[in-house]
Image (cartoon, grey):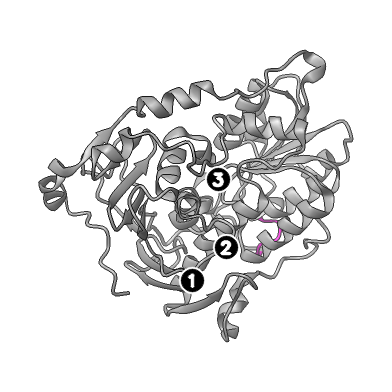
């Protein structure tokens, strides 16, 4: 891991800030292009509204369903926790309620499913939905394991259903602008990418407690190992357990590493090597996902990438988003750099952003509304902006980093075969044994 990491030191950053051009608003030429493009098709009549089921009624799920309700009808809500169902019913009082997602799959009047569950349920629910003839909007990260993603890609091809991954940054204009500029050589030859993610949670040891009334803990665990109920394992903080997720590496990494792959044109492949350093260790008896880390990826074309966490939220200027959060993607080339995060895009030279792309430039898939793109594709049967293969590859790079953190050594990866090269121990991490009766076939 010899590559110098992106400098996150406040003093050194501010000293160099005079060389930075900030663009809190998009350049006029790009804004005009966006305005000229056709928008998502509006709902024409009540009969034109697909019937949607929400499975997983936490904050993200309810937010997705609210967006979907502008384009379709939420006819069912499903969650293993009665308290979550109650909250969803307040938003969608006419929706039928379910505790077991399999009952939702039995309804042939439902056109699509929004999967807003914990990560370890994404794959089995998405498989079940597609096999029952339903399209899927699945929250990111799309999968828990690399084998999960391979299963979903095969299922999409077999069932011909639409699957949209909830990596909504692909539908945000500043991210598309950054990726189009990089893909068209605006910073010269792309040499290195840095993805900056928030640090995770370190806590514990935690104590078990009685299962709250109304929560089906067995069904919540699903295919994962049966353990005593610990409140920190459930709901929001599930993401800090390797058993159910991968910490901020998969939570935020599924967003920013996706943009890194999009901008580099490598979003249907992967790196050829990965090396990771854990900068802190989990507390015994506490969260099991590594909270602080730096990961180095190398691609077949010589491109390198650093994915690093940080806890320094005091920086101003080029490495914070519009809300002051420190995370984003920095593309570095032979002629300069471009940094992009939510609500902000910056470059080492003002002309990189203000000069329009030529008419002959490569242009990327245009979506200005992620949920709207899903509904458009439900009608047209064209692939959405973040289809299964892309969602799988974006999650896979995060999983590769998590595996390298677990093993603590450099790994060689074959992105075509999707296996580690001559590494039986590493390949054991590509899938996880499921607790009976759950399996890919039983989904």
SS label for mark 3: helix
Label 3, residues with CA under 10 Å away: few <14, some 14-19, many ≥20 = some
In the displayed structure image, the side of residue 386 where residue 184 appears, left or right: left
Q: Residue at x 28, y 43 (%)?
A: 347
Relative vertical location of residue 123 with respect to residue 419 in this rendering, above or below: above
Magenta span contains residue 223: yes
Magenta span contains residue 348: no
Is the magenta region chiefly helix, strand or loop? loop
CB atoms at circles 3 and 1 under 8 Å apart?
Answer: no
- Residue 77 visible somewhere in the drawing: no
- Residue 254 visible somewhere in the drawing: yes
Quadrant of the rendered image containing residue 88: top right
Label 2, residues with CA under 10 Å away: few <14, some 14-19, many ≥20 = many
Mark 2 → mark 1, Cα distance in angstroms: 10 Å
Q: Residue 153: x and y, percent?
A: 72, 56
Q: Which mark is residue 300?
A: 1
Pointer 2 residue: 269
Q: Residue furthest top?
A: 45
Q: Residue 16: x and y, percent?
A: 13, 48
Quadrant of the rendered image containing residue 428: bottom right
Nearer to the camera, 111 or 97? 111
Nearer to the camera, 108 or 386? 386
Nearer to the camera, 334 or 418? 334
SS label for mark 1: loop
SS label for mark 2: loop
Q: Nearer the viewer, mark 3 or mark 1?
A: 1
Pointer 3 residue: 235
Please tell me which of labels 3 and 2 falls first in the chain. 3
Q: Residue 87: x and y, percent?
A: 62, 28
Mark 3 → mark 2, Cα distance in angstroms: 32 Å
In the displayed structure image, the side of residue 387 where residue 232 appears, left or right: left
Highlighted range, magenta: 221-225
């Amino acid at each position: 891991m010899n590559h110098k990491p992106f400098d996150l030191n406040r003093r050194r950053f501010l000293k160099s800030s005079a060389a930075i051009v900030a663009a809190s608003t998009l350049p006029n030429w790009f804004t005009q292009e966006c305005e000229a493009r056709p928008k998502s098709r509006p709902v024409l009549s009540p009969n034109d509204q697909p019937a949607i089921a929400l499975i997983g009624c936490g904050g993200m799920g309810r937010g997705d369903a609210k967006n979907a309700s502008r384009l379709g009808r939420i006819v069912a809500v499903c969650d293993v926790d009665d308290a979550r169902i109650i909250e969803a019913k307040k938003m969608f009082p006419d929706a039928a309620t379910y505790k077991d997602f399999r009952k939702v799959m039995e309804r042939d009047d439902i056109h699509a499913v929004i999967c807003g569950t914990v990560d370890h349920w994404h794959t089995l629910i998405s498989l079940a939905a597609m096999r029952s003839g339903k399209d899927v909007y699945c929250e990111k990260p799309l999968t828990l394991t690399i084998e999960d993603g391979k299963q979903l890609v095969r299922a999409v091809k077999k069932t011909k259903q639409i699957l949209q991954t909830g990596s909504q940054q692909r539908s945000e204009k500043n991210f598309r602008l950054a990726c189009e500029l990089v893909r068209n050589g605006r910073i010269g030859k792309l040499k290195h990418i840095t993805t900056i993610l928030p640090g995770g949670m370190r806590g514990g040891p935690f104590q078990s407690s009685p299962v709250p009334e109304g929560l089906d803990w067995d069904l919540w665990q699903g295919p994962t190992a049966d353990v005593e109920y610990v409140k920190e394992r459930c709901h929001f903080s599930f993401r800090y357990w390797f058993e159910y997720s991968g910490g901020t590496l998969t939570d935020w990494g599924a967003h920013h590493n996706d943009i890194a792959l999009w901008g580099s044109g490598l979003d249907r492949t992967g790196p050829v090597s990965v090396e990771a350093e854990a900068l802190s260790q989990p507390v015994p008896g506490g969260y099991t996902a590594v909270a602080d880390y730096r990961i180095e990826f190398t691609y077949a074309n010589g491109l390198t990438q650093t994915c690093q966490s940080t806890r320094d939220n005091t920086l101003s200027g080029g490495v914070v988003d519009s809300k002051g959060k420190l995370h984003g993607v920095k593309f570095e080339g032979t002629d300069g750099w471009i940094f992009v995060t939510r609500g902000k895009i910056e470059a080492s030279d003002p002309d990189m952003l203000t000069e329009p792309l030529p008419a002959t430039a490569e242009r990327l898939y245009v979506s200005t509304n992620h949920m709207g793109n899903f509904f458009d594709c439900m009608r047209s049967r064209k692939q959405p902006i973040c289809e299964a293969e892309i969602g799988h590859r974006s999650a896979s790079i995060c999983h590769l980093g998590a595996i390298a953190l677990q093993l603590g050594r450099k790994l060689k990866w074959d992105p075509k075969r999707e296996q580690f090269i001559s590494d039986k121990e590493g390949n054991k991490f590509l899938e996880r044994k499921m607790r009976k009766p759950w399996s890919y076939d039983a989904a």
